[in-house]
Image (cartoon, helix red, strand yellow):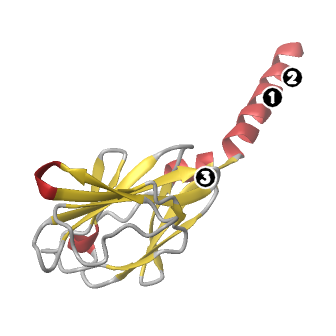
Amino acid sequence: MKRPTLAILLLGVGLFLLSLPIPGMRLSVDGRPIAWLPLSAGERFELTWVHSVSGNQVREVFRYQNGTLLFTETHNPWFAAGLGEVPGRGRVVAEAGHAVAVVDIDEPAWGMVFRLGAPSVDHTLWYRGQPLGLSRCYPHARLAWSPERRPWLLARFLAKDPCL
């Protein structure tokens, strides 16, 4: 009699733990959800694309911290218009090959909206080392991301758009 009771108790505890919400980020294109990505404290991901004027790859870095998504740094292979030191908004550092980065920006980034370029612009979200080819799948679309907590069990079984 005690074993079935213990098994039911353990099953209940397990289901409870699996139903606890975990933090993540919902990606939407033109208002349609395309993916949900879990985020751990301190986790970083990058958005890269090819600059329309220079043809060089630009890289922007984001970090999830204390429930907030932060835009932390931007890397550009050349010092372009608009890249300069703005008091209170990061600092400029030199990188190899005359490249420049603005680091320590740490501005909240929830609700950011991007216009994705043509496939040649190659907007790519780098999440846990894996590329999500946004321009390839959704050229000229509107990309938005927002925070969303989902139960662990539900999050594990919801697939992202097959194009990604």
Identify whether 156 is placed above or below 145.
above
Per the image, label 3 sits on a secondary structure element best described as loop
**Quarter that holds the C terminus:** bottom left
Q: Which residue is mark 2?
A: 5
Count of numbered circles in the view: 3
Whole-percent x and y of residue 127? 36, 51
Identified at 33% across, 69% down, the residue is 84
At 10% from the left edge and 72% from the top edge, which residue is drawn?
55
Query: For residue 23, which numbered disc appears in the image?
Result: 3
Q: Are marks 1 and 2 in contact (CB under 8 Å)?
A: yes
Residue beneath disc 1: 8
Residue 149 location (% of width, % of height): 64, 57
* Residue under the image location 24 percent in, 59 percent down: 100
Viewer-side residue, 51 vs 125: 51
Report the side of 120 relative to 21 (left or right). Answer: left
Question: Quick one: 9 or 24, which is closer to the camera?
Answer: 24
